[in-house]
Image (cartoon, helix red, strand yellow):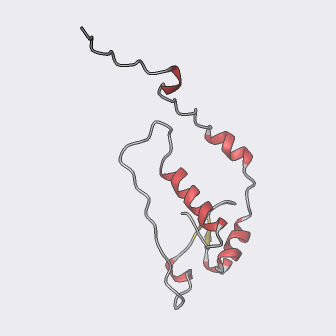
């Protein structure tokens, strides 16, 4: 008489993978070269005098300071409801998208 086969046990290589530990924000901050705000403003084609500086690393851009009349830009809104196990969130996605667009020659800004 034939006996039914038992299901094979999963091999050790098929175990669930664990997400890597996220890099602390302080560690990422130390690895990145900070650019001067004036350099960023010049690259975006904005006039420094029309902006409101907030310390050395932030500026407020009034709507009137943004040039009009050129080609329309595109807007990507990044939202989330629940966090992922790896800790990737809206900020990580936004920065990755901006870096990717810049890498292919597009002008991209994350705010």
From the image, which quarter does the N terminus lie in? top left
Is 28 rendered above or below residue 63?
Answer: above
From the image, which quarter does the C terminus lie in? bottom right
Q: Where residue 86 sits: x, y (%)? A: 50, 38
Q: Residue furthest left?
A: 1
The answer to which of 52 and 78 lies nearer the viewer is 78
Is 97 rendered above or below residue 62?
Answer: above
Dividing the picture into quarters, in which one does residue 107 lie? Answer: bottom right
Q: Where residue 51 sits: x, y (%)? A: 61, 75
The answer to which of 68 and 100 lies nearer the viewer is 100
Identify the residue shown where x is 65% and y is 76%. Answer: 44
Q: Where residue 46 sits: x, y (%)? A: 64, 79
The answer to which of 107 and 16 lies nearer the viewer is 16
Identify the residue shown where x is 74% and y is 61%. Answer: 35
Q: Residue furthest bottom?
A: 69
Q: Residue furthest front?
A: 1
Q: Where residue 4 sits: x, y (%)? A: 27, 14
Dividing the picture into quarters, in which one does residue 56 lie? Answer: bottom right
Identify the residue shown where x is 70% and y is 66%. Answer: 37
Q: Is residue 80 left or right of residue 64?
A: left
């Amino acid at each position: 008489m034939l006996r039914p086969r038992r299901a094979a046990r999963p091999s050790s290589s098929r175990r669930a993978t664990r997400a890597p530990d996220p890099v602390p924000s302080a560690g990422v901050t130390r690895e990145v070269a900070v650019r001067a705000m004036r350099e960023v403003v010049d690259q975006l084609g904005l006039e420094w005098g029309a902006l409101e500086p907030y310390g050395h690393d932030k500026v407020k851009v009034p709507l009137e300071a943004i040039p009009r009349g050129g080609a329309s830009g595109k807007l990507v809104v990044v939202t989330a409801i629940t966090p992922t196990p790896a800790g990737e969130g809206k900020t990580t996605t936004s920065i990755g998208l901006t870096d990717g667009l810049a890498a292919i020659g597009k002008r991209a800004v994350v705010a």
